[in-house]
């Protein structure tokens, strides 16, 4: 694994596209301060670290009651001041990740790992798992895999099941990226076996198994794992993502009412613009498939209000979703308009996959080979499903409120 950048170099890499910070609630210079403090603290001799930590204003670091994602849930919260500080730094790093500041997050978590290296074995391994996640997002997949495997093996040997479970879930996420479905279900199943009932690790494992069920179009398994993950989630952001996934499997299984209601509920919960646009893209496809022109128009109107140059990928994704929706609804003129707009934006930012998908749709529109949904199409008989599946669909139908 490469060495982390110095804080100022990490800052320069993360903010090279300054336009994306316009109107953003968190500014990059704040993350630079955290990254610099973390690096400085880890560079000090052991005997000077506590003194330096005590000189910092309390408002500098996140609230100590917040804990990062990857922690040992089978043990009590740490009492050691340096371990607590390392967790606070990692909480800030997770916020950096949400802002796309991966280099500053990498520098910050690397420093946090050094702070706990000789103090707390579980905290040190958890920090390594956190680093692996950042490395994965930076595109260094093989390095992330080696880190996850190392933590999973060491944590199992040393008796830290929760820590090992998070590393296995990380390997499951890599399997998703590679399209390796057998490995995906294997790793997330192992993580679930290690998770304490009701823990965040169980939620992470259930999420992975839900996504596997989505990939193989297993409605029953997706609903079981998805609703359990939903109930264990700690934020509307997480719940919105899960609800959108459940709406997706309902759409795949041809249950229009459940699909549309699920998407509407997810959109209502999705406060971050990035998340809203992503869900709206999927919702638009479902709306078009079921002839819901009114919803397509609402998604366009709301998307124009929310979107902008700060999020070009999500904006292009949303436009393509509208195009696909209108194509399915029989509105070839509107579909072509949105597809060309999506293609132009994707091409200008070199989003090659979106360019390809836009071109494919435009070719289908030109050749008049787009399949439109007919209102008299047969949908599955709900009464033939298991009681658990029926209950999961009914809950999804109620999601729109």
Image (cartoon, rainbow, N blue to C red):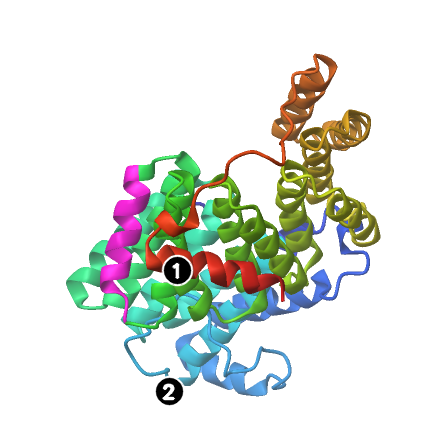
Q: Secondary structure at mark 2?
A: loop
Disc number for residue 185:
none
Specify the label residue 204 is tagged with: 1
Visible residue check, residue 351: yes
Magenta region's main secondary structure? helix
CA–CA distance between discs 2 and 1?
Answer: 26 Å
Q: Assess whether residue 194 is covered by the magenta stretch.
A: yes
Question: Is 156 rendered above or below residue 329?
Answer: below
Question: In this orientation, which residue lies closer to the viewer: 372 or 146?
Answer: 372
Q: Is residue 273 left or right of residue 210?
A: right
Q: Which residues are magenta?
A: 182-196
Q: Nearer the viewer, mark 2 or mark 1?
A: 1
Estimate the x, y position of residue 336 in percent, counting from the top left: 78, 25
Q: Which residue is mark 2?
A: 79
Residue 103, relative to residue 324: is it above or below? below
Q: Quadrant of the N terminus?
A: top left
Quarter holding residue 146: top left
The residue at 41%/81% (across/down) is 47
């Amino acid at each position: 694994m490469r060495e982390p950048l110095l804080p100022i170099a990490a800052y320069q890499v993360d903010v090279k596209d300054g336009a994306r910070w316009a109107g953003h609630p968190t500014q990059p210079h704040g993350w630079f301060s955290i990254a610099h403090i973390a690096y400085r603290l880890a560079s000090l001799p052991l005997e000077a670290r506590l003194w330096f930590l005590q000189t910092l204003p309390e408002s500098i670091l996140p609230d100590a009651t917040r804990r990062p994602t990857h922690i040992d849930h089978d043990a009590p919260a740490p009492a050691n001041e340096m371990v607590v500080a390392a967790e606070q730094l990692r909480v800030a790093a997770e916020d950096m990740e949400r802002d796309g500041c991966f280099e500053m997050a990498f520098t910050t978590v690397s420093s946090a790992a050094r702070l706990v290296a000789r103090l707390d074995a579980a905290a040190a391994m958890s920090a390594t798992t956190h680093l692996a996640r950042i490395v994965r997002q930076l595109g260094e997949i093989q390095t992330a895999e080696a880190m996850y495997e190392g933590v999973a093996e060491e944590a199992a040997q040393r008796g830290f099941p929760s820590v090992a479970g998070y590393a296995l879930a990380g390997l499951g996420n890599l399997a998703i990226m590679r399209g390796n479905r057998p490995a995906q279900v294997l790793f997330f199943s192992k993580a679930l076996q290690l998770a304490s009932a009701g823990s965040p690790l169980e939620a992470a494992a259930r999420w992975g198994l839900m996504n596997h069920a989505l990939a193989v179009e297993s409605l029953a398994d997706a609903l079981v794992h998805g609703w359990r993950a939903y109930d264990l989630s700690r934020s509307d952001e997480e719940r919105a993502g899960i609800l959108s996934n459940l709406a997706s499997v309902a759409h795949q299984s041809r249950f229009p009412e459940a699909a549309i209601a699920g998407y509407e509920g997810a959109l209502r919960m999705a406060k971050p613009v990035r998340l809203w646009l992503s869900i709206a893209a999927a919702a638009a496809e479902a709306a078009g498939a079921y002839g819901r022109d009114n919803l397509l128009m609402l998604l366009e109107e709301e998307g124009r209000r929310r979107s902008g140059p700060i999020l070009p990928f999500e904006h292009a994704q949303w436009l393509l979703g509208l195009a696909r929706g209108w194509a399915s609804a029989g509105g070839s003129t509107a579909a072509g308009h949105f597809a060309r707009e999506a293609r132009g934006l994707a091409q200008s930012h070199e989003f090659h996959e979106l360019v390809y998908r836009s071109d494919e749709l435009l070719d289908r529109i030109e050749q008049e080979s787009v399949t439109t949904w007919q209102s008299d199409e047969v949908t599955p008989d709900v009464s033939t499903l298991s009681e658990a599946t029926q209950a999961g669909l009914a809950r999804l139908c109620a999601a729109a409120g």
